[in-house]
Amino acid sequence: MGGYAAFVWPSLGIATVILAAMAIASVRRLRHSESALRAAEAASPVRRRRAESRAETGAGS
């Protein structure tokens, strides 16, 4: 590497650590967003009304 290995390998390692941290943060944020969406959908009055009407008619089994 012409004497630049001392700069290339640490920068490669730092870039790898940063990319891994970004991937982990993205997955954690996705899971949190999905659970928040499920909670919001469950609390939605429209969804509750649909579930109640299905239960009354016996549909959706």
Image (cartoon, grey):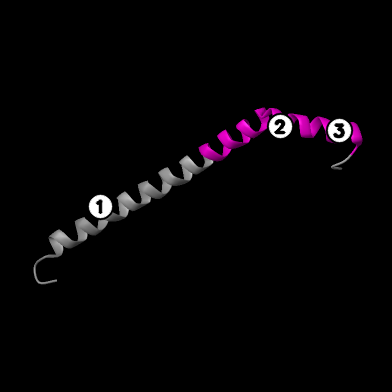
Asked if residue 21 is positioned above or below residue 13 in the image, the reply reads above
Q: Which residue is mark 2?
A: 46
Q: Nearer the viewer, residue 4 or 28?
A: 28
Please tell me whether mark 2 sits on a helix, a strand or a loop.
helix
Residue 16 image point, x, y percent: 31, 55
| Badge number at residue 14 | 1
Q: Residues within 10 Å of mark 2 (few under 14, many from 20)?
A: few
Q: Which residues are magenta?
A: 32-58
Q: Which residue is mark 3?
A: 55
Q: Residue at x 79, y 33 (%)?
A: 51
Please tell me whether mark 3 sits on a helix, a strand or a loop.
helix
Residue 29 image point, x, y percent: 46, 40
Asked if residue 43 is positioned above or below residue 34 in the image, the reply reads above
Please, what is the three-letter code of the amino acid marked with disc 2? Val
Kindly report the distance in space between the C-alpha atoms of the residues bearing marks 2 and 3.
14 Å
Please, what is the three-letter code of the amino acid marked with disc 1? Ile
Please, what is the three-letter code of the amino acid marked with disc 3? Ala
Foreground disc of the pair 2, 1 = 2
Which part of the image, by quadrant, shows the C terminus?
A: top right
